Image (cartoon, rainbow, N blue to C red):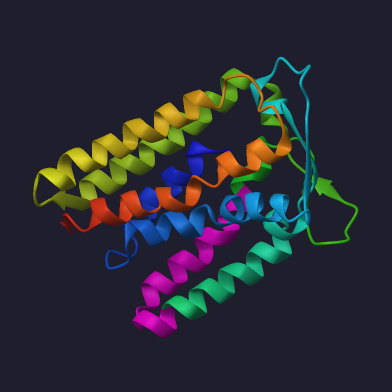
Amino acid sequence: MFIGHFGLAFAAKRAAPRTSLGTMFVAAQLADLLWPILLLAGVEQVRIAQASRNPFLTLDFVSYPWSHGLLTELVAGAAFAALYFAVTRYAAGAIVVGLLVPSHWLVDLVVHVPDLPLYAGGAARFGFGLWRNPIATVVLELVVYFAGVWVYARAARATDRVGRYGLWSLVIFLLLLYAASFGPPPPSVKALAWTALIGWPLTLWPWWVDRHRNQR
């Protein structure tokens, strides 16, 4: 899943109003933020299936136990929560970000074909395989995404034009980014990894928007 993770991040803001939306984005997408770095370092591997006509199956995730292993995400979530609480002393926010990190594995479980590991070195792979039905996948992702945006928009009121137009610009940009993922497969794994690094600067946008919105 791609855009659905952002939907969860938007919705999570309601449960922890004092936590920045940017922090929610980092937590929900931490696995995908680490993945391109580990690809470039040669720690994890992916293959590009040029012949696949299904846009969700153009990538064959050969090995990614550190970024997308359930155990790693649970540990990373606990570490993220502990660090967040140490800095902010905001328990609700720490709990929410701590849960958002491993939520990535659970949400991916619904759509991925069996390629999600439990831990590094484990042979078992999991995934319910909704990706095999592209239409159902898109419908599910958009429902989760727009539901999250709706929850956030109702929970946080814009205080100025930045808060109003910045939010809807972000919503549209993420939709365009999602649509772009249906294009031709990347020319190489290295190109894929460098492109995926856009996730890091992208987290600044929700942080900026959230500073211009107040909780209802």
Front-lying residue, 115 or 62: 62
Kindly indicate the quadrant of the structure image that contains residue 51: top right
How many numbered tags mark residues here?
Answer: 0
Give residue 197's position: percent from left, percent from top: 54, 47
Q: Is residue 62 left or right of residue 3?
A: right
Where's the C terminus, which quadrant? bottom left
Q: Report the residue at 57% width, 74% height from top.
A: 78
Where's the N terminus, which quadrant? top right
Q: Is residue 189 left or right of residue 182?
A: right
Give residue 139's position: percent from left, percent from top: 50, 24
Q: Report the residue at 36% width, 57% height from top.
A: 22
Q: Report the residue at 59% width, 50% height from top.
A: 32
In magenta, the rendered stretch is 85-106
Front-lying residue, 191 or 82: 191
Give residue 208's position: percent from left, percent from top: 26, 54
* SS majority, magenta: helix
Tell me if residue 132 can be seen: yes
Residue 130 belongs to the span the image colors magenta? no
Q: Is residue 162 left or right of residue 105?
A: left
When the figure is inspected, residue 19 is found, relative to residue 12, above or below; the finding is below
Q: Is residue 105 left or right of residue 178?
A: right
Give residue 97's position: percent from left, percent from top: 46, 65
Kindly indicate the quadrant of the structure image that contains residue 69: bottom right
Front-lying residue, 42 or 123: 42
Residue at the limit of the structure toward the left, as seen here: 160
Tell me if residue 128 can be seen: no
Q: Report the residue at 50% width, 80% height from top.
A: 82
